[in-house]
Image: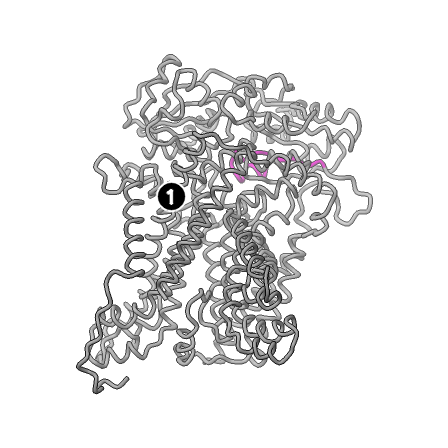
Amino acid sequence: MSLVSPNAAVIPRRPSPWNRRTAWGWAAVVAIAASLYIAGVGRADVDLFNWGGLGQAGQFFRASLAPDLSPEFLAIIARAALVTLAYAVCGTTLSVLLGFVGGLLAAEVWWLTLFPRRGGALAWLTVRGLLAVPRAIHELLWGLFLINILGLDPLVAVLAIAIPFGAIVAKVFSEILDETPRAPLHALINSGVGPGSALLYGLLPLALPNLLSYTFYRFECSLRSAAVLGIIGAGGLGYEIFLSLQSLRYEQLWTGFYALILLNGVVDAWSALVRRRMGFTSRLDLNLKRRQSASEQAVPGAGLRPSSPSTDRFLQLSSWGAALAIPLCFALLRIDWSQLWAARTRRLWAEMLAAATPALPTGSEISELLRLAGLTLAMSVLAIAIAGLGGLLFSFPAAHNFFMPGGLLRPVGEQRQSWPWLAGLALGGSRIALLVSRAIPAPIWALVFLFILFPGILPGALALAMHNFGILGRLMAEVNENLDDRPVRALRALGAGGGQVALYGILPQNLTRFLAYILYRWEVCMRETVIVGLVGAGGLGRLLTEQVSSFDYARLTVTLAVFVLLTFLVDGISQRMRQAMR
Amino acid sequence: MVWFRRTVISGISSLLLLWPLAGCVSRTPTSPAGEAPAGGTSATLPLVVGAIPDQDPEQLQRLYTRLAEYLSAELGVPVEYKPVTDYAAAVTAFRVGDLDLVWFGGLTGVQARLQVPDAQAIAQRDIDAEFQSVFIANTGSNLAEIKDISQLASLKERTFTFGSESSTSGRLMPQYFLEQAGVTPADFGGEVGFSGNHDTTIKLVEAGTYEAGALNSQVWEQRVAEGAVDESKVRVIWYTPPYYDYHWVISPEVEERYGEDFIERVQAALTRLDPSVPEQQEILELFGAETFIPTQNENYAQIEAIGRQIGKIQ
């Protein structure tokens, strides 16, 4: 790789601009443009902005300065925050357990090792397909469904988190397993160890730390989810927030938001710290080439010193705390597992199965379903495009190693550190902006956008974008912080300016990972279209809430099936796109 | 300094993790009024009271604590209030037997009774026998006041929002009256909205997001009296004819649990609420009622017919 090579005169052929990557790029551009058109952006006949509603939006934001801080209400909120935390802990614990088992069953390597001949591949594909079903259905719908079987039981909210999240963990864990190097496994098998023991000793120990690291990210997600589930009677912050929303008590609403922001901030910070101490710098390592991450591990992130869990006091305390917190949370929520096999539960199951036998849709119903599926897709595409772009822009100021003094994007050999406080302000400000946007639930953002926009898919897309922007920005900032800084420093040394460094040193390294995150959240956005139905163009989500409120389970099953198919489609597209980017 | 920071952080985070312990300890004394003492061997099962989410949150909490105390004293059984904030969840909880006595809206009450054979509507407020919805419009929409039901046709091609999907006063009856005037939801400009609740309907019409909307007249009048409505931006265009709305529905299961005449006793306890007794006056006031009056299933035949017509009852 020396610069002066004898073949230097032979210029490599420029790769054709028409390849798989650019084809997917164009497809994305077309999809976004079509979604914008459907949303009415740039169409002369569609009014988008409702300036008359600025006053109402102002009322909402002014209340942020005067939250309800009366002692009685604060006591209610503190208790609610505790309940929300408990639901998140229980939901995460259960979803990781479910996901661990499901992940093993959904991993190709598991089946190919245990059943090397036939049937293995078939069983693997079946399990993978089945896992898409719980994933496609939003936690809230799971909650409404489980009430039918378990009644008003705290188990409802715990399972409503654990079932879909368990399926997500299973998918991610199976991918981790399949990408774990198989040399130790093969070595054990070839030396005559049985397949079961070989998996246990040759594969699992290598994959488990990644699962543990992913658990922390899942915990953050469960916390946000627990805040939405309050509306089915699960209690907690979600319950208080939705009650205040019922009668638009903005002051109380903001007290709830501040509690959510605080809780999210503390949990995120704690999880980041634990992972850093354990030597895992990324929240979720989506299936990217391992070679890439191997080169990154050679360059530990800014001043991090991975220490062994057995000597680190903080990690010891954390693990003792977690070991104590999990049973306490189950006890606090008074989880009674026997409910799961009680006689009433079995009777209600049978009733539910009978009621949910799908009714064959008529021709007009099918065309309506297709139209709504199109709207849902457009809303999710628009949401994820905006969230991705925003997250990308905010990931630079929100990463601590870019603009702060001594950072990668500061001019070289700078004499006086110009505006050091400004960089600090940008860091803090952008992080707070990301925290606030992800802590506030999407239905609340939908209401705010509905004040200043006319009804349609745009306010819904913006609400989902706002919430997911906070999540993506945080994930992307973390990628930036774990950047291999050697190419960047080299570019700087050669005299490249800030913009050039970003375009040629940083983005080429990070873009594939950014896009992987964006595609992963796209699926989540699809599912979340269900909860922003109030914008007056919820697509399938609106139809679902209508059918739920009419107890029309036969048609509900059909709509859910369409949702599952849509999730399959989105899943397939995003997998192809990720492959094309490798 | 590093060790110091580390100690502080680990200390704080371990405290955070121990927080649930504190919650566990403090939970017991704050259990709802009248709840059966935990751990009792032969404690009577409590009568579980619920309500659809249609009122102010702080009021709801105060209201049902008072009501549970009152009912417990009158009936001699423990009474527990369980909060639910979703209409469909309240109906489902009643169906599976986790709620025994529920304050339902007109439509949700019918939905609940159809799913629980022999469930009974037992009482309602004096105002519920002649309840009304109100149609409101943004002043910028230039929608004229409606004198006759046929003039509802002027709402065609306008943007319009209902409240919650399951609301009687915010959706079912307005949609029924609109259809009588030949206006179906497909006739509005764009998709019809479902704001989720009465207060949001007011704010969205006030903001001009929707040109018009329909809601519970009691909520509207209360908000106007509080001064929470900008009357230069939103005004009433029509009051609907009266219909039967909110009512108490009780499950037949309670008679097996507490004795033959229990349903009658609950009905009597509710209708006996006396405005001249201060504690009872407070309950009535929180409900926005003068008294409770007896009611019966037959009063909701119209609601059921409309529910079937519109597709809210299968």
**Left or right of residue A123, residue A516 in this image:** left
Residue A71: image x %, image y %? 53, 50
Q: Magenta stretch: give its range.
A: B47-62
The location of residue A401, given as percent across then percent down, is 34, 73
State which chain disc 1 sits on. Answer: A
Whether residue B178 is visible here, answered yes or no, is yes
- The residue positioned 61% from the left and 34% from the top of the image is A355
Q: In this view, does A279 lie above or below B33?
A: below
Question: Please, which residue is most extreme toward the left here?
Answer: A9
Q: In this view, does B171 lie to the left or right of B270?
A: left
Residue at 31% from the left image edge and 53% from the top image edge: A28
Q: Quadrant of the N terminus of chain A?
A: bottom left
Relative horizontal placement of residue A82, taking residue A289 as reference (left or right): right
Q: What residue type is labelled 1?
A: Gly
In the rendered view, tell whether residue B250 sits above or below residue A433.
above
Residue beneath disc 1: A460
Visual colour scheme:
one colour
